[in-house]
Amino acid sequence: FFIYTEKDTRKDETVFVEQGKPVLFGAANEKGIKLDGLKPVIININENGNSVNDLWVHDEKDKTKAYILARMFDHPDEKNHFPRPFGVFYVEDRPVYEVEMEEQINFISEKKGKQSLDKILSGDKTWAIQ
């Protein structure tokens, strides 16, 4: 489908979401997406008393809205279809495994000092069988 890249159709067929900004699209940014509960709806902000204030404001920390965005676009051959969204849908701050592991190693090293691998693996609660 070239409708997402062609100059004549790109602005009506795509929407670029940005953190904290209303979800707008169209040749003159005259269309937007508002949420009716959790259902996205396309509106023209210049008609029926609609305004930019009625639109969905993108929040990349909201997992539910990110899911709606990811599932929003449908078949471009259908009438009144949603535009294909682009941008950052969702951001989650999570610890990185390597950083957490290094912090644990440093904590134990400070607490118990440098130890040999055998001592680390055997730990304090081992016994010898004879």
Image (cartoon, rainbow, N blue to C red):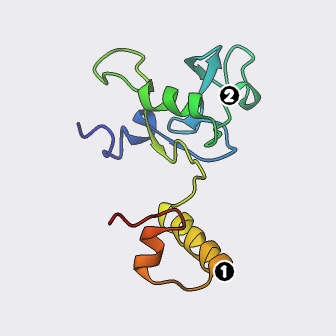
Quadrant position of the C terminus in the picture: bottom left
Where is mark 2, residue-wise?
A: 55
Residue drawn at x 70%, y 44% as measured from the top left: 20
Q: Could you tell me residue 9's position as x and y percent?
A: 36, 37
> With respect to residue 57, does 121 lie above or below?
below
Q: Could you tell me residue 98's position as x and y percent?
A: 48, 67
Of label 2 and label 1, which has the lower sequence position?
A: 2
> With respect to residue 97, does 32 lie above or below?
above
**Residue found at the very far front of the displayed protein:** 130
The front one of 60 and 1 is 60
> With respect to residue 65, does 6 lie above or below?
below
**Residue found at the very far left of the displayed protein:** 1
Assess whether mark 1 and mark 2 are in contact (beta carbons under 8 angstroms).
no
The front one of 126 and 82 is 126
Disc sitting over residue 110 in the figure: 1
Q: Is 61 situated left or right of 129 in this image?
A: right
Q: Quadrant of residue 23?
A: top right
Residue drawn at x 65%, y 40% as measured from the top left: 59
Please tell me whether mark 2 or mark 1 is closer to you in this view.
1
| Helix, strand or loop at mark 2 | loop
Q: Amino acid at mark 2?
A: Leu
Q: Amino acid at mark 1?
A: Glu
Q: CA distance from mark 2 to mark 1?
A: 53 Å
Quadrant position of the N terminus in the picture: top left
Residue drawn at x 44%, y 34% as measured from the top left: 12
Q: Residues within 10 Å of mark 1 (few under 14, many from 20)?
A: few
The front one of 30 and 19 is 19
Q: Quadrant of residue 104?
A: bottom right
| Helix, strand or loop at mark 1 | helix
